[in-house]
Image (spheres, rainbow, N blue to C red):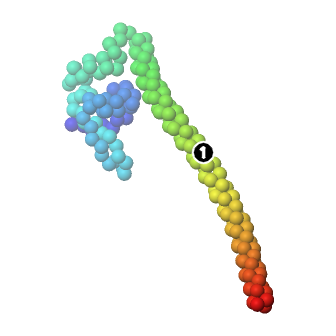
């Protein structure tokens, strides 16, 4: 039993690392994560004969079918088949990137909406503070006016009391 990294396995099969990782995600390969040189690395377990075409002719046929889709009829077809496989991998990557872009656009729209709501709340809070301080100022003015009116009432009450006392004095004097 051999252990190969994803890169080594991809090179042996002449496939992209992304394709091998997809196979791993799909459960088609036996793997384990190991710590190598302080880094977590996914290793693939393969039989010793798996990459030896002489001892495993079934694998050689399978590998050719996997790599080329079918056995090429001449040397000119091999690059075309490889280009087709690379193009398929590129299209797969583009599709994944488009999906990620769509998710990012959704996230940006959500953040923009939240930013707008935050602005509204900030503006509202600012206006609320302004209104609060305006009302506090009006309250202080009303209190000052009330104090002056209370003083005037006290003065008038005092005058009234003095007049009553004077009236009482005059009445008592006349008697």
Q: Is residue 22 visible?
A: yes
Residue 71 lies, in percent from the top left, at: 32, 13
What residue sits 35% from the left and 32% below the top? 21
| Residue at numbered disc 1 | 120
Q: Is residue 126 visible?
A: no
Q: Quadrant of the N terminus?
A: top left
The vertical placement of 13 against 75, above or below, is below
| Residue nearest the observer in this picture, 148 or 105 | 148
| Residue nearest the observer in this picture, 92 or 80 | 92
Residue 162 lies, in percent from the top left, at: 76, 83
Residue 58 lies, in percent from the top left, at: 21, 20
The vertical placement of 78 against 23, above or below, is above
Image quadrant where residue 27 sits: top left
What residue sits 24% from the left and 22% below the top? 59
| Residue nearest the observer in this picture, 59 or 121 | 121
Residue at the extreme front of the image, as rendered: 175
In the image: residue 28, left or right of residue 115: left
Residue at the extreme top of the image, as rendered: 73
| Residue nearest the observer in this picture, 126 or 163 | 163
Image quadrant where residue 93 sits: top left
In the image: residue 55, left or right of residue 168: left
Image quadrant where residue 148 sits: bottom right
What residue sits 34% from the left and 35% below the top? 6
Secondary structure beneath disc 1? helix
What residue sits 70% from the left and 65% below the top? 142
């Amino acid at each position: 039993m051999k252990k190969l990294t994803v890169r080594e396995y991809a090179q042996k099969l002449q496939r992209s690392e992304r394709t091998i990782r997809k196979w791993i995600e799909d459960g088609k390969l036996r793997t384990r994560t190991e710590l190598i040189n302080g880094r977590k690395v996914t290793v693939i377990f393969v039989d010793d004969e798996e990459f030896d075409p002489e001892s495993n002719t079934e694998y050689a046929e399978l590998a050719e079918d996997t790599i080329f889709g079918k056995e090429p009829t001449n040397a000119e077809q091999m690059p075309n088949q490889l280009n087709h496989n690379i193009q398929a991998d590129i299209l797969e990557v583009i599709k994944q990137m488009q999906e990620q872009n769509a998710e990012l656009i959704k996230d940006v729209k959500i953040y923009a909406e939240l930013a707008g709501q935050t602005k509204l709340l900030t503006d509202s809070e600012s206006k609320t503070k302004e209104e609060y301080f305006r009302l506090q100022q009006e309250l202080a003015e009303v209190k000052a006016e009330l104090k002056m009116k209370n003083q005037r009432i006290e003065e008038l009450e005092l005058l009234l009391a003095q007049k009553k006392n004077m009236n009482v004095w005059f009445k008592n004097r006349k008697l």
